[in-house]
Image: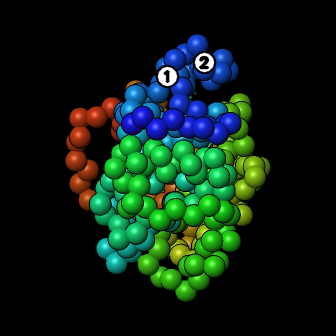
Amino acid sequence: MDEKPNERGIHQWSDISQFPEHLTKYWHQRYRIWAEYNRGIWMTEDAWFGVTPEPIANKIAAHLAESAPKEKTIIFDAFAGVGGNAIAFARSGRWEQVFAIEKDPKTMKCAKHNAKIYGVQNKIVWSTGDCFDILKRRFAGNSNIIIFASPPWGGTEYSSEDVFDLSKMEPYNLEKLYRGFSKYTKHVVLYLPRTSDLNQLARYATDGKKVEVAHYCAKGASKALCAYYGDFNFDVEEEEDGGEVTSAQSPECCV
Ligand code: MGP
């Protein structure tokens, strides 16, 4: 795709010599992050560590497609970033509507462009703004929605502690996220650090219900986890897809 970004802060890096040095490790992962990277993916600097790598985004989309109650037809990606998850949701074909919300207009431009590369730009409803405001304006009283959120974790320092304290996550901690989203639906999926404190996650389980936590792994190591709140049915047989992404549920956090 030939379209070039013409705005400061939006990049289409095609050569390591122009690439920010502090992000070099992500340059080497670029084809694992975007299989179609060479077709002209647009990125911001921060997007390199926040975007969900494509095989993981596809795996999460497949899990959601299989496990969400059939009557739920709308998926709301609260922090769409440069589009990784929303593109995967749209490509899964499971949803009548995929909403992608992003606060930063430049990041949003990247997401729309990247969705065009994957042929799904028109299958996504895009909104630039604060996800909590948009939920309030458009989704009060809507019962068909599943909320997926891959929030900022406060930068790349999240792995400096053995256990990540979700009460300290910036700018939105677990309390703010869960309380903010659960006003609209009990089906809330959070993409969080692999080292997240599972006891903190378990505190938000509704009485007598489990919280399913799945680790999403690449090359044998967890990259991140998803906490699934609500009635997701994971009792279905998982198909072996032969890919390099695996997931493992963590029964120890079920309550
Ligand atoms: P990472 O820890 O920055 O890189 O991100 P890496 O190389 O996988 O880790 P290392 O320890 O093996 O060197 C791992 C994954 O976490 C990324 O691919 C993103 O999907 C996710 N991720 C990282 N950060 C800092 C964020 C964030 O702030 N928000 C979200 N939603 N995801 C993040």
Can see residue 19?
Answer: yes
**Horizontal arrangement in the rendering, residue 236 relative to residue 134 (left or right):** left
- Residue at 35% in and 71% down: 96
Type of amino acid under label 1: Ser
Marks 1 and 2 in Cβ contact (< 8 Å):
yes
- Residue at 34% in and 78% down: 71
How does the figure colour the protein chain or chains? Answer: rainbow
| Rendered view: 64 above or below 169 | below
SS label for mark 1 = loop
Type of amino acid under label 2: Gln
Q: Which label was assigned to residue 14?
A: 1
Relative to the observer, which residue lies in front, 41 or 181?
Answer: 41
SS label for mark 2 = helix
Q: Which label was assigned to residue 18?
A: 2
- Name the image quarter holding residue 144: bottom left
Can see residue 211?
Answer: no
Place of residue 142 in the rendered image (x, y in percent of width and height, measured from the top left) = 50, 83
